Image (spheres, rainbow, N blue to C red):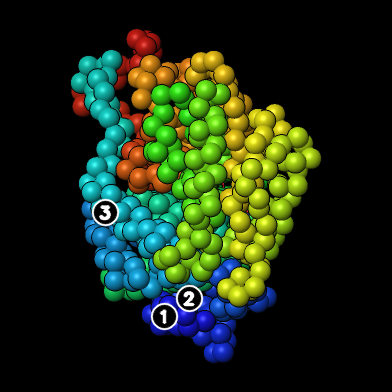
Amino acid sequence: ANQFGMKEALAQLGIKDINEGTSTGLNHFSNGEIFESYSPVDGQLIAKVKTSTAADYEKVMQSATEAFKTFRLMPAPQRGEIVRQFGEKLRKNKDALGKLVSYEMGKSLQEGYGEVQEMIDICDFAVGLSRQLHGLTMHSERPQHRMYEQYHPLGVVGIISAFNFPVAVWAWNTALAWIAGDVCVWKPSEKTPLCGIACQNIIAEVIKENNLPEGISCLINGDYKVGEMMTNDKRVPLISATGSTRMGKIVAQTVAGRLGRSLLELGGNNAIIVTPDADIKMTVIGAVFGAVGTAGQRCTSTRRLIIHESIYDTVKDAVVAAYKQLSIGNPLDENNHVGPLIDTHAVEMYNRALTKVVEQGGKILVEGGVLSGEGYESGCYVKPAIAEADNSFEIVQHETFAPVLYLLKYSGTVENALDVQNGVAQGLSSAIMTNNLREAEHFLSVAGSDCGIANVNIGTSGAEIGGAFGGEKETGGGRESGSDAWKVYMRRQTNTINYGTSLPLAQGIKFDL
Ligand code: NAD
C-alpha cells in the first residue's frame, strides 16, 4: 500500500504495517476477534484490527469514569488549551491523516485534507468557546434573591460514527465535549477503523504530554454489537450517533429506554429546487458537485433536482453534459472527480436503485454501471447516474448512498416545488436556486423548507462548522458543531440564592410556623 506515500503516512500515524501484526492504538483496549480494513481505492488489505470485547469495554468505561472525576475540575479555559494543542497536532498530521482518510474511505485527497481542516477549525472554535460557556441570570420574584443558571459537564459522552466522515464527526463531538468537561468514548465505523486508531494516537500524545488521565479519550472497535454496549450503558448520559436512519431508530429507542440523552445525525434525502429565475451555471456546478462529490456518500449529497417545467430541458441538458466531463478513478489522483464507493455492498445498493427506478416508471438519462479493468480492481468504482423520476416512487423516497440523481419536474409556483421537496421522510439539507427575492424568502420562511439546513444559491452539501449542523424528521433532530450546539454536552442547573434574613416562598405562598 505504498502509492502516494501511504506507507510513510501510516507509520507517522502509528498504524503498524500489516506484516507486523494487529494494529492497536494507545488508550484503547481490544482483544477480541480480528477484522480487516480493505481500501476501496485499490482493494488492498491495509491492516488488521481487533474488536473490543465486553471485558475491554469495562476497562474503557472504568478509565473514562475515573478520568471524568478530575477532568471536570479543570477550569474550562484550561481544557480549551488542551483542545488548542490537539488542533496544533492535527495541523502537523494533516497531510498523513488526510491521506489515510482518502485511502481507507475512498474520498478525494482534497476532501480528505478538507476533513482534517474541519477538525482543526472545530478545535479553534472550541478554544474560544471554552471562555463562553455562559448561562443567563434572571430577576427573582423574591426580595434579596438572585437567580441564575450554569452549565456543568455531563460525564461520559459515547460517540458512534459513520464511515463517510471517519474523522471529522468525532472531532465535532469531542472538541465541544472536552471543553465542556466531558470525557469521550468513541466507536468509529467498522468500515474505517484505522482512521479511528490514527485519531486516538494523536490525542493520546496530547493527553500524555499534559500528564492528564488517559480516559479523557477512549476508543473501542467493532460493529454494532460494540456500539450496543454503550447505548445500553447507564454510565453514558449522552450518545451521539451518526449514521443511517435505521441505526438511529434502534439507538434512540435503546437510549430513551434508560432515559438517556441522544444526539442523532441520520440520513438525508436532499433536494435543490431550480426555479425559472435560477442562474443555470451556478445551478449546474452546485448540483453536479452535490450529487457526485464523495461519490454521493455525503449525508448532504444532492439526491433530487426539482426543476420548473419552463427550464426543465435546459437544466437537464446542461447537467447531462456536465456528467460527460467527469473522470472516475483513484481519489488520491487529483485529476479524478469521482472515487469509489466504500465497499461492494454499497455497489449492490447502487445497482438496486438503478433497477428499481426503472421498474417504478423512471427513465435513465445518464447510464450507470460498475467499472472494471485496470485501476478499478477493488470493484467499488461506479458511474454517476441520472434518472427522470417522480417523487412518489419508493426508491426516490429512500436514501441510496451512491451517486444517483433523480430529476423531478414541477409546474406553477415555488409552493408546488416545496411540496415535493418536503414530501419525504428525511429533513437534512435543502437548497433553492433563484434570483427572485420572493421565492428565496418564501423558501426560508415558516411555510418553506422543513430541513435543518436551507441554502439559497448554494448546493446542499458542504456546511461550515460555525453553524449548527443537523436535520429534522427522520434525520433525527440533533445539532452538532457551531452556534449553541455545545449545550447538549452539558447539563443546565438553575440556582437561586437568598442573601436576605427571611425565607419568602415562591408564588407568594405563606407557610408560618
Ligand atoms: P450505519 O448506520 O450503517 O453505521 C453507523 C454507525 O452506527 C457505525 O459505527 C455502526 O457500527 C453503528 N451502529 C449500527 N447499528 C447500531 C446499533 N444497533 N447500535 C449501536 N451502533 C450501531 O451508517 P453508515 O453506512 O456508516 O453511514 C452512512 C449513513 O450515515 C447515511 O445514512 C448518512 O446519511 C448518514 N450520515 C449522517 C450524517 C449527519 O450528520 N446527519 C453524517 C454522516 C453520515
Ligand 1 lies under 8 Å from the Cβ of mark 1: no
C-beta proximity under 8 Å, tags 2 and 1? no
Tag 3 residue:
124
How packed mark 1 is, by other alpha carbons closer than 10 Å (few <14, some 14-19, many 20 or more), is few
Residue at the image point whose x is 44% and y is 29% from the top? 432
Asked whether residue 294 appears in the rendered view, the answer is no
Q: Which mark is residue 25?
A: 2
Q: Is residue 455 left or right of residue 142?
A: right
Q: Is residue 135 left or right of residue 221?
A: left
- State the image coordinates of residue 402 (x, y, percent, origin top left): 60, 51
Ligand 1 lies under 8 Å from the Cβ of mark 2: no
Q: Amino acid at mark 1?
A: Gly
Residue at the image point whose x is 72% and y is 57% from the top? 348
**Quarter of the C terminus within the rendering:** top left
Q: Which mark is residue 223?
A: none
Tag 1 residue:
5
